Image (cartoon, grey):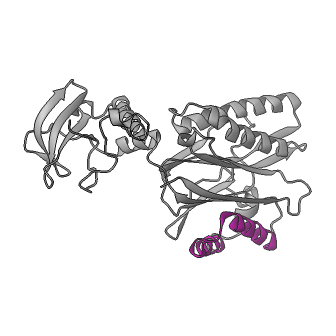
Amino acid sequence: MAFEIDIGFASQAGRKQINEDFCAAMLPEPGQEGMGSIVAIADGVSTGGMGKEAAQTTVTSLVRDYYGTPETWDTTVALDRIIGAQNTWLAGLNHRRHPVLGLTTLTAVVLCGQSYALAHVGDTRAYLLRDGSLSQLTTDHVVDHPDLKHQLLRCVGAEDMLVVDYSQGDLQVGDMFLLMSDGVHGTLSTKRLKSMVVLAAASGQDAQALSKQLVDEALAAGSLDNVTAMVVRVQGLLDASLQDENRHSLTLTIPARLKVGEAIDGFAVTAPVADNGINVLYQTRDTQTQNLYALKTLHPARAHDRDERAMLAHEAWLAKRMQSSSAAEYFVNIYDKLPNAQTHTAFYLLYDWH
């Protein structure tokens, strides 16, 4: 299945003269599909009218520079490098032109392979609608007091050092991500927001129409702030990315040393093949079809070595990429899903036996 997403956004100044919100989305160029797609929203905070500039430059630099980072970097590492550089630049600019300041919130989501990565600072928000359940993915960085709920504790450009919240999760077809400024989520109740997005998902409403509806609803409900909403609907997924493989490797255990006759996930060991103290290779047989396979995993002594897990996950990712290349006939076939339709209960790679 091809990676397919539907993106929509809407933004209005509302009752304010200037719209200091800003949002953008970027899709990968041909050859960069492994980087995924990125969406970001920011709400500028002004002292002297520079909030709009802060929001625009922060979002623009993030979605533009993300595709200049190495594909082998973890997405959160790439985001952190870019956001950190933008914060340093903006904070330095603010120091030089004080008391005129330009600060901004930032919430960004990268959808890549079969997972997403989220970066967040401030009080813009990200939500995920999945199977009719709406979850808030971010925490507002604001003063915990009713009279100071719009006072930010963290934002881009305020300090030389910035702490950004990062999170990652799996993607599913049908997922809907919603990013919005406080002009929207601060006006619409959680109950009203959920009813709107659940109905939109059930009716197949496109992302652009829902974004506009959220903004219009917030204005009609009396929002006094700028109002911005972004909607991303996941309609198709690619094969697992390198980061998917890395994350998958950390969620499964390393199998204990296997003896001849012992089985794992329906594959019985027929012979040990190699053991270099880091990796172990077995010849195995499908207990149902009797077909032979090569099973490669880490030595039990390396079970807690994250670097070795990452190396084996990298091997899996490269092998799967080669299978879709013009040189596929020269490489041994690796299985993304087990041929016996069972689910991995441990971390290992399964190849055809030759």
Residue plotted at (79% across, 43% down)? 56
Residue plotted at (26% across, 50% down)? 345
| Left or right for 188, reference 323 | right
Prevalent SS, magenta region:
helix
Q: Is residue 35 magenta?
A: no
Q: Quadrant of residue 177?
A: bottom right
Residue in front for this viewpoint, 298 or 84: 298
Residue extending furthest toward the top: 276
| Left or right for 157, reference 205 | right
Residue in front for this viewpoint, 38 or 336: 336
Find the magenta span and give its range.
Answer: 192-221
The quarter in which the C terminus is drawn is top left
Up-down relation of residue 334 to residue 192 (above or below): above
| Left or right for 298, reference 202 | left
Find residue 81 and report its horizontal and vertical position in percent: 62, 32
Say if residue 162 shows up in the picture. no
Residue plotted at (71% across, 68% down)? 209
Count of number-bearing discs: 0
Find residue 297 and report its horizontal and vertical position in percent: 25, 36
Residue in front for this viewpoint, 50 or 259: 259
Q: Is residue 208 magenta?
A: yes
Find residue 287 and report its horizontal and vertical position in percent: 13, 52
Up-down relation of residue 273 to residue 166 (above or below): above
Up-down relation of residue 198 to residue 23 (above or below): below
Say if residue 99 shows up in the picture. yes
Q: Quadrant of residue 292?
A: top left
Residue plotted at (35% across, 41% down)? 249
Find residue 86 and report its horizontal and vertical position in percent: 72, 33
